Amino acid sequence: MKKLFSLLTLALLTMSAWGANTYVKVTSTDQLVAGKKYIVVNEEAAAGMGGITGGSTKYAAAISGLTIDNGVTDIEDLAVEELTLGGETGAWTFEMGEGAYLFWGSGNSVNTTDDATAATAKWTVTASANGGYILTNAGATETRVLQYNANSGQERFACYKGTQKDAVLYVQDPNAAPVVEIAAPTLPAAQTFVESLEITITNNEAGATLYYSTDGLAWTAYTAPFTLTETTTVYAKASKDGHDSPVVSATYVKVEPGVIVFTSATDPGNGTASASAWTVTKEGVTLDCSNGWVDANSYRIYKDQTLTISSTAGTIVKIEIVGNSGSHLVSNLVPDAGEYTVENNFGTWEGTATSVVFTASAQARASEIRVYLDGDAPIITVAAPVFNPSGRKFAGSIEVALTCETEGADIYYMLNDGDEILYTAPFTLTETTTVKAYAEKDGTESTMATATYTRLPEVATLAEANALATKTDFVFTGNVVAVYQHKSNLWVKDATGVGLIYGNQVPTIAEGSTIKSGWDAQFYIFRGHINEYQYPNNVEATDAPLQTIEATEYTEAQVDTTTINQRILVKDLTLTTAEDSLYLYTADGMAIYNMFEITYPESVEGKTFDVEAMVSYYNNAVQLLPIAITEHSGAQVILGDVNDDQKVSIEDVTALIDYLLGGGTAINVANADLSADGKAGIEDVTLVIDMLLGGN
């Protein structure tokens, strides 16, 4: 039982209201008698009742007219009707009067009996199979069971919502002595053991004597640790001055397992340094990940992917997973069945199964996985076949070879659970296929090895890749050019579009490099607008000469979602600073976020700037990730370039004449003012013609 916490305020409020009408906890069926009033209330709200001190304002409760605040609404005139007994083995009814409330104290929720659905709510009390009693309120908004478990040694009524205790039963008894709280002892956590387990009970009450039991009925004084050699439920309690603590219990299960240990450093499986489906099989147990990555540091399972642990060597009774630190926690793995606990990023699954599936709610990493079987680990005399290459994604076709370390063993394989085939030579796959294989020698078979080869759709251009449905795997058969790289972000382009290759698997690629064809990834539209190629594999640069990468010039007004993932240059921007030193803003409010950790200008007041950046998207708006920010030097004047096409030609004469005649042609007046009189005139026409004819 939880120790009660102090609630002095509520105790003072309730002292005068309750007076002699104290309430004591119901600990035996003898207290369920006619003529007394009962209330169900959270233990932390029991301040002032029958000498109990402590409680919590979160679960404040009251009796007989006291107004209290339960965090949701004020409850007034709380009253509980008398409990009428119809015999120990018969049915009891517990009726609430009109306007009465029953306070649970769980999540600040209140059940009332004066609404249409519960106006006649009753507690029906029946004998339970284990000799205790169950009180069930059939009309309450949320079903609760109030149960007295005579065999557990707890000797009290407790209120449960499912398996979670959230309240206890109190009885009005003006003659009852105050309840004395004795702290319960502590038992070791429930666990499995192989041969024996030593049990140490910790005393949490000074001066108390400890007792333990293995059946909840016969008690033995505890004087020293004792040893279990069979599956046992241990009960423990403390006794002091004639008062007992609540009883605690834990079950310890003896198993005789074989323990199969998988360590990523030594058992990398078929996914080494590759984001794909990976499989590791040893000694009759297989780890199979739908999408992840394996290296010397960890088995990695990506978000929404599964890790299936299966056994052909015996029933799995426990799985222990040692996780990595950071955000990739073992607690991100959710099993499909069985009990699963996570402590200090060490996860333990317990149950009985031949296959257990874990799904990653977020990326999870495990450095070691231990699988406990219900028998000794099998002695393997024939080695399992090895796939070369290991299971992976492929384009077009892939040739698979099988080998076995056991000399003279025959290898048999199956394609998609088809007929067994005796292996004689490498075979070619052209479609997605799961290959299973085992080796046999002298009547002894190895464990089954499994590998999956997934054929991916092929795309030759970024336009085709960007047209895929989100979360589609693909193989890229064309060539792209590296535009810019920052850590695991590699922006690329080809003649049809742009995109971002993202993932820890991306190596360092020089700007302007051509990427080899044959890399694969999963297309994903990040934040609804950013075309990303996630979980990439086989990203490598060719030996082709580096291409010159130049930013495309845009005005700020032209920078929108169509420019995302492009390398751009925006000139003559007025910038303002923000409280967050990583941000600058344009005069029109476009955010500039210093993702690449460049040096920002010391001062931006009274100046304008040219910003070279990659275009991204964040907080529902286009954002610039600056590569360089330089002070704007002003427009360059090219005398004679009237139409501003960066050259001087006869078109400039035509444009200037049309401008002077009012034809509406837009010209660069600064470039047209060859006479330096501050305007474009007929004399400038003459000077442009003279320039074209080779004059001065």
Image (tube, helix red, strand yellow):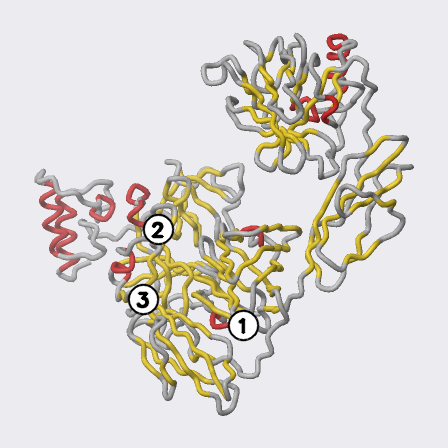
Residue 74 marker: none
Q: Secondary structure at mark 3?
A: loop
Circle 3/circle 1 CB separation < 8 Å: no
Could you say where residue 66 lies in the image, as x and y percent from the top left? 67, 9
Q: Residues within 10 Å of mark 1 (few under 14, many from 20)?
A: many
Q: Visible in this render: residue 481?
A: yes
Q: Secondary structure at mark 1?
A: loop
Give the residue pinned by disc 2.
525
Give the residue pinned by disc 1.
284
Q: Visible in this render: residue 598?
A: no
Q: Residue at x 72, y 49 (%)?
A: 233
Residue 456 marker: 3
Q: Quadrant of residue 575?
A: top left
Residue type indicated by callout 1: Gly
Up/down of 254 relative to 586, above or below = below
The residue nearer to you, when weighing 262 against 575, is 262
Q: Quadrant of residue 239?
A: top right
Could you say where residue 392 lies in the image, as x and y percent from the top left? 40, 71
Could you say where residue 235 lies in the image, as x and y percent from the top left? 76, 44
Residue type indicated by callout 2: Ile
Q: Mark 3 vs mark 1: which is more N-terminal?
A: 1
Q: Is residue 423 found left or right of 109 in the rendered image?
A: left
Up/down of 171 relative to 364, above or below = above
Q: Is residue 379 found left or right of 417 in the rendered image?
A: right
